[in-house]
Amino acid sequence: MSREDARGDYGQPPTDWCDWWSGVTRLTDDLYYGWPEGETKPWFWHWCTARNMWDGAGTGGHDLIKREPLHLEPSLHWPGCCGLHGWVRQGTWCPC
């Protein structure tokens, strides 16, 4: 199933349907982040090509170096699904 075939609004980017985060920000067409209420670190949505769906994840195990522009350490990695892996530095996604 492609993103275009996904059910309902969830085939669209999180900016179209994620209303429980303030300020959903696009890093790439397949990666977005936002700040759920009460959280001190951002959460991410990425388009998982293995599951053909948006997958959300927190960053509790990461250090928030800078909020604006966003900088997290260490790298973000989703080994349990599509294997997406990269860094967020200076508000930019840098694939590994």
Image (cartoon, rainbow, N blue to C red):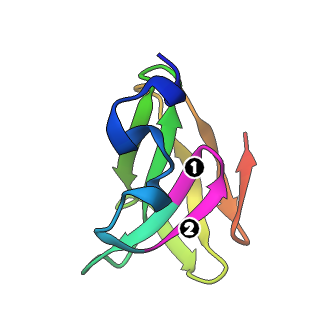
x%, y% of residue 67? 56, 81
Magenta-highlighted stretch: main secondary structure?
strand
Cα distance, mark 1 to mark 2? 9 Å
Q: Amino acid at mark 2?
A: Thr
- Tell me which corner region of the image, top left, top right, bottom left or bottom right, holds residue 88: bottom right
Residue situated in front as seen by the camera: 54 or 44: 54
The C terminus: image quadrant = top right
Task: Indicate yes or no whether the magenta region holds residue 30.
Answer: yes
Q: Secondary structure at mark 1?
A: strand
Residue under label 1: 31
Left or right of 26 in this view: 94: right
From which residue to which does the magenta span run? 23-32
Residue under label 2: 25
x%, y% of residue 12? 48, 45
Residue 77 vertical position relative to residue 13 in the rendered view, above or below: above
Task: Indicate yes or no whether the magenta region holds residue 48.
Answer: no
- Tell me which corner region of the image, top left, top right, bottom left or bottom right, holds residue 62: bottom left
Q: Amino acid at mark 1?
A: Leu
- Tell me which corner region of the image, top left, top right, bottom left or bottom right, holds residue 83: top right
Q: Name the residue at 45% across, 50% down.
A: 45
Left or right of 12 in this view: 9: left
